[in-house]
Amino acid sequence: MSRPELQAPPEIYYGDTEAKKYTKNTRNQQIQASMTYRALELLNLPPDEPAFLLDIGCGSGLSGEILDEEGYIWAGVDIAPSMLEVALEREVEGDLFLQDIGQGFGFRPGSFDGAISISVLQWLLNAETSHPTSSPPHRLNRFFTTLHSALRNPSRAVFQFYPSSDDQIQLITSIAQKAGFGGGVVIDYPNSNKARKVFLCLFVGQQQQSQQVPKGLEGEGEEVDGDATVRFEKRRARELRRDKNGKRKSQKVVDRDWILRKKELYRKRGKESVPRDSKFTGRKRKTTF
């Protein structure tokens, strides 16, 4: 079967039917979960610290649910309206934006503490028209240049993608470097046709030259896939716990520390109406009848 990106533009390929079909497919859910966990591992964020992440090509929110589980605040962009509609129906936590990433981003500089992207970059490698602005190099340049601006210094961006050739990998990495990124390609299970995965791990910051590109995982991938399956099944079990109205029950523990982290993230996102911190923040109130 032809690869999806060769059949039609993403906003057309992922119409209403395909968007729902993709989201409900348990195999897709498992793969998406496994690759998102790996992307977060490569992102190497400081443990137990709040972070505001950008999910590029967020689709119906499968990766966003993993970000929620790991305690991150996130915003997602996608070009397919049907995918975003499914995300809204599933009540994902992140802010959603309809965006053609090949046209670049309009976020304020330094908005995000990091970015991830699962199975998206290859869609930028196909020109939809003969116009120069639709060429893959032009779209990649706009994408990486504006993304570099939107990330804080220092930070990382991790992309899992499906290149069809080494030339495509070279094109992507060279344009990313021209946009100001450091880093390179990480290949997990390079000797396995089934488990092989390609990640682009990019660095932003003054010390990017001294940072080492992470090493890819070795072996056949069976052990890691099994671990990801366990985490996936646990997540699915939590999703099945719903209230009488069909909505998922909140598993969050709201205490003073959680509130302070949330307020700090909102301030970093530029919200002006965040209440100031005080000794009463997160205080327990008496039960009222």
Image (cartoon, rainbow, N blue to C red):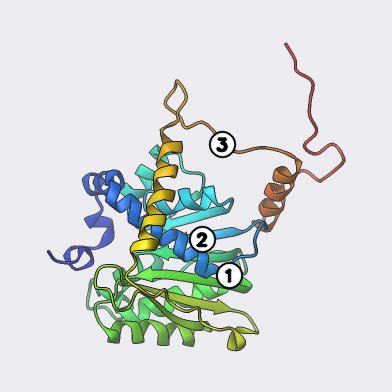
Instruction: Give whichever of 229, 145 is nearer the camera.
Output: 229
How far apart in space, not on screen, are marks 1 and 2 (Cα)? 9 Å
**Hey, what amino acid is under mark 2?**
Leu
Is residue 271 toward the left or the right of residue 88 in the image?
A: right
Q: Dot 1: within a 10 Å radius of its alpha carbon, few (fewer than 14), some, or many (20 or more) residues?
A: many
Q: Position of residue 5 (x, y in %)?
A: 23, 66
Q: Position of residue 122 (x, y in %)?
A: 30, 71
| Residue at 46% over, 43% down | 92
- What residue would you read off at disc 3? 251
Q: Among all residues in the image, which is located at the extreme top? A: 289
| Residue at 34% over, 67% down | 221
| Residue at 22% over, 44% down | 17
Q: Earlier in the sequence, mark 1 or mark 2?
A: 2
- What residue would you read off at disc 1? 151
Quadrant for the C terminus in the image: top right
Is residue 119 toward the left or the right of residue 181 in the image?
A: left
**Hey, what amino acid is under mark 3?**
Gln
Q: Are marks 3 and 1 in contact (CB under 8 Å)?
A: no
How far apart in space, not on screen, are marks 3 and 2 (Cα)? 23 Å
Q: Secondary structure at mark 3?
A: loop
Is residue 279 toward the left or the right of residue 15 in the image?
A: right
Location of residue 148 with respect to 260 vertically, above or below: below
Q: Are marks 1 and 2 in contact (CB under 8 Å)?
A: yes
